[in-house]
Image (cartoon, coloured by chain):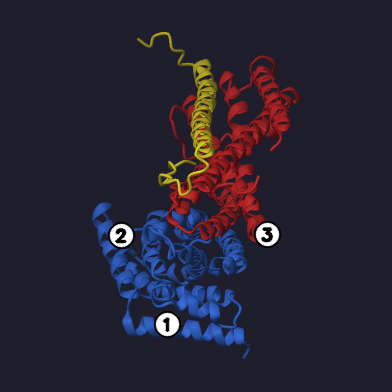
Amino acid sequence: MSGRTLKALSIATVVFLTAGFVLAIFWAPMDADQGFKQKIFYLHVPLAIVALIGFVAGGIEGFRHLRSGDRKHDANSYVYIHLSVVFGVAVLVTGAIWAKASWGHWWVWDEPTLVSFLIVFLLYCTYYPFRYAIEDRDRQARYASVFAITAGAFVPLNFLAVRMAETLIHPRVFASSSGGLPGTMMFAFLVCLVGMGLLWLTLVKVELAGKQASGQVSRLRRALSADGGGGSVSGRIAPEMEAS
Amino acid sequence: MFENVPTDSTGYVLAAYIFFLLMLLIYIGILGAKFVRISREIGQLTDEVEAGKVDAGSPGKAAEPVREESSV
Amino acid sequence: MTPGRTAFAAILGKDLRTELRTMRSLPAMVLFAITTFIIFRYGLDRTTLSGSLAGGVLWTTLLFAAILGINRIFVSEQEEGGFDAFRLAPVDRTVLFTAKTAALFVYLSVLELIVVPTFGVFFLPQWSGLVPLILVLAGANLGFAALGTLISSMAVNSRARDLLVPLLLLPLVVPLMIAATGASAPLLEPGGPSYDKFGTWLLVMGLYDGIFCLIGYAVFDFLLED
């Protein structure tokens, strides 16, 4: 795991995120009907898009794991899903704040994208207890990959179904925002989106590096106590990284 | 106590961005804690290895059963 | 008959015969559903239901009754070494998936055969909507069966077996439930069935069933590995 990539990624993340937020708050024009509170969406939507892509990427890594049997893909799958769940928390909270600002309630059932995201989030929350419930490492990795693939396929289906169920004519903020966005807003939004994507990638790298370090420490431990014959019990639920 | 909290749009926007910042900081904190723990373990292991080298002549050095802490 | 089809028939036949003889899951599922209807009658304080309320009550009840059956679909394999026996047999492993899915589909259909008329007797002023409802029930059954088999096969080999199925299944079937209730609610209107968006919802269910049947078929092999 190259330290240089991580450094470059982190710097790029900081640059893009800061630039994005500055542009969003100070440079992008005020939204005609929503006013200043529309600025939340420069934070909320990139988080959501990146999280959803992350979930699907987790499914792809799950597929690669089943195909190749290489545990590295299982570790990737876990980290992608884990980080997307964390981003998902941020999506839901910022979404709730925006809902409160727009309609006076912390939650609204009328915004199909938000509801869809909640359902997806709940599904991926079950990933952790699911992994934990399977003791055998190999089986756990395989089953987790199956889950990642199934859940990844579920994401687009879910959005379709929820959108269709939406009967109320609602200010489609996201469509109107990304469809009829004036150039300046779109630019600021894209910078934020890239920034969030870079943030996700940076955190993924950090998590994977951390896993690798933990894995190496465990292996060292096992190697050392192998002389004395002491056993080690791992209470971990998450996959370990094997070879570096 | 909360008279100065802006309850209009600005307040909500600020709250959202601050929440994001908070999550980022908490995450960095967790990373830091993980790093500290790994450093500690590496320190322990280094001590064990060096102790092992010191009495390299004595075979069958009893090693304590090692229990790993639950971690992600 | 190819070995695949013989195996399919054998497994399906064994499951259905066992269920007929031991009555392990179906009575519980049916009783559960009927009791739930009674609870709804008092909880909602209504003696007739129509439209989306009827659809909601019916589908919630069917969903939870289905979970009871799904929990038990692999129990005999788990307890009596059927998985090992199957691994040794010279058949394509996905046959187990298709056979179990078919068995679940049959159980759910039998469940609905009893429960839906009961629902009609309890709550519906008129039954004309129930005939097109059969299509919706079939679509939902296939989705439940495929996903239920997939998840149950993973859950049966894990610790919190009974918890895992509802935990994983419930979020996954939300789109299916949205489509099922969306299609059913207009059918159960007091004035007579309306087919508002009926075709679209059936299409969504078909898409859902197709995707998850395919996924289940594709990944089941990996689940059976030792």
Residue A68 — which label?
3
Residue A45 — which label?
none
Quadrant into which the N terminus of chain C falls: bottom right
Q: Amino acid at mark 2?
A: Thr
Instruction: Give the spatial CA distance, label 1 vs label 2.
Output: 35 Å
Callout 2 secondary element? loop
Q: Between A66 and B22, which is closer to the camera in this rendering?
A: A66
Q: Which residue is mark 1?
A: C16
- Seen from this angle, which residue lies furthest right? A183
Q: Between C19 and C224, which is closer to the camera in this rendering?
A: C224
Q: Quadrant of residue A83?
A: top right
Count of labels shown? 3
Q: Which residue is mark 2?
A: C48
Letter of the chain in red: A
Q: Give the x, y percent position of residue A166.
A: 53, 46
Callout 1 secondary element? helix
- Seen from this angle, which residue lies furthest front? B57
Instruction: Give the spatial CA distance, label 3 vs label 2.
Output: 56 Å
Report the side of A182 relative to A54 (left or right): right
**In this view, A3 is above or below C153:** above
Question: Is residue C222 visible in this depiction of the protein?
Answer: yes
Tell which tag, 3 or 2, sits nearer the viewer.
3
Letter of the chain in blue: C
Letter of the chain in yellow: B
Q: Amino acid at mark 1?
A: Leu
Tell which tag, 1 or 3, sits nearer the viewer.
3
Callout 3 secondary element? helix
Residue depicted at x 31% and y 63%: C123
